[in-house]
Amino acid sequence: MAQELAVITNAQEEYIFVFMASVLVTIVLISILFPAQFTADPLTAVGQTGMWLLIVFVTPLVLLVALTLYTDSSRTAVNRDIPMVLGLGLPVLLTILVQWVFVRWRVKRDMIGGKAS
């Protein structure tokens, strides 16, 4: 998928950073969401952790988009930067949501006794 995205967007060297950041974010999210399911109230902990992760990752993304759109550089430079910003932000948001859904599903399944032995 990463290769197809790079081909479609006519990728430059900076896309290497985008793809490396996606892997790093996935590892960080796993290390934060995984322990949340082992708290006293796992459903609430996973929900609050997911909400805070969205806040922590969306705020810099919004600031980065604002900086990209309202910079004093030429329009062609901004148009060239938008795919990179979106390539950095959208996978992060999708990763947060997918991991939150899977962890929440697992917690709910374990709470109703669906644990496989």
Image (tube, rainbow, N blue to C red):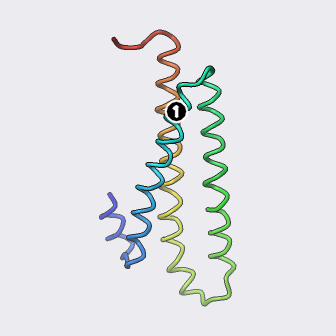
Amino acid carrying mark 1 in the image:
Pro
Residue at image position (62%, 47%) is 54
- The C terminus lies in which quarter of the figure? top left
Residue at image position (40%, 63%) is 20
Left/right of residue 107 with respect to residue 61 in the rendered view: left
Left/right of residue 67 with respect to residue 112 in the rendered view: right
Query: In x, y percent, where is residue 98?
Result: 48, 40
Query: In x, y percent, where is residue 55?
Result: 67, 49
Query: In x, y percent, where is residue 71?
Result: 67, 82
Residue where numbered disc 1 is placed: 35
Mark 1 closeness class: few <14, some 14–19, many ≥20 residues within 10 Å: few
Displayed quadrant of residue 45: top right
Residue at image position (61%, 20%) is 40
Total numbered badges shown on the rendered structure? 1
Displayed quadrant of residue 64: bottom right
Q: Which of 75 and 92 is in front in this view?
A: 92
Q: What element carries label 1?
A: helix
Query: In x, y percent, where is residue 106?
Result: 46, 24
The answer to whether 64 is drawn above or below residue 104 in the figure is below
- The N terminus lies in which quarter of the figure? bottom left
